[in-house]
Amino acid sequence: MPKTSNKGKKTKGRKAAGLKGMRSRLSSRANGASRQAAKKGNQTSPNQSASLQDKALREHLLNLLRARGAHIDFNDAMADWPAQLAGAKVANFPHTAWMLLEHMRIAQWDILEFSRNPKHKSPKWPDEYWPASESPATERDWTASIAAFKKDLRAFERLISDRKSNLYEKFPWGDGQTILREALLVADHNAYHLGQLVMLRKCMGI
């Protein structure tokens, strides 16, 4: 059997080592290029970053207005509330469901109109922010108030969703108010009185 010379073995060994080293270098270069590409892809310009932040803030505001999270939403709070109990009083509770509903509707409407109409005139505080009676005159008044509240809430959501609406710009007709501030005001006010409505319906056993 022919013998392989030591010189041949060394040559083959050098070739194998060379190929192994070349593969290692190519792999290292490929990995480095991939990391650079990934890093470059993750980089965003200041304008892109600001746009993403603006989008995220609008989504947070919409979720807050829709009571997604810690607050109950309007539909759940008012679900299946009998119109005949809209004016019912509960001991040691100052308001009826009708009074709370109308107060929420008027306040939300006022904030919405103030946010989009420079000629809007707000009702007189506090009397005109509450209904004149403890109960609706008809069942139609009750359902109409519920529908109007939902309609205005949707309008405010559209105002927030509109990327042309500057959330931070102060209203020229106001004294420091912005859309962002008014959106938070609507969400806070609605959450407070929705909580009252939930307590009221629990006391009434609805």
Image (cartoon, helix red, strand yellow):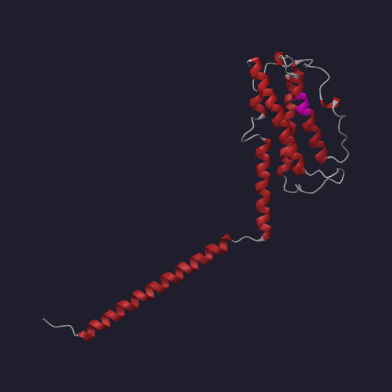
Residue at coordinates 68% horizontally, 27% vertically from top-left? 195
Answer with the quarter of the image where residue 180 lies. top right
Rendered residue at 65%/42% (across/down): 60
Give the extent of the magenta segment: 101-105
Magenta stretch encompasses residue 103: yes
Q: Quadrant of residue 114?
A: top right
Residue drawn at 66 percent across, 57 percent down? 48
Which corner quadrant holds the N terminus?
A: bottom left
Residue at the far left: name it. Answer: 1
In the rendered image, the vertical position of residue 203 relative to residue 146, given as above or below? above
**In which quadrant of the rendered image does the C terminus lie?**
top right
Residue 116 x, y percent position in the rendering: 81, 41
Q: Is residue 34 left or right of residue 129?
A: left
In the image, 37: left or right of 186? left
Q: Position of residue 87 (x, y in %)?
A: 74, 15
Q: Residue at x 32, y 77 (%)?
A: 17
Q: Going by the image, does 38 lie left or right of 181? A: left
Look at the image and say whether residue 13 sits in the magenta stretch. no
Question: Where residue 160 appears, x then y in whole percent?
Answer: 72, 42
Q: Position of residue 150 (x, y in %)?
A: 72, 30
Quadrant housing residue 21: bottom left
Q: Name, please, the residue furthest toward the front.
A: 92
Report the magenta stretch's main SS. helix
In the displayed structure, 164 sits above or below 24; it is: above
Seen in the picture, residue 127 relative to 157 is either above or below; the reply is above
Total labels drawn:
0
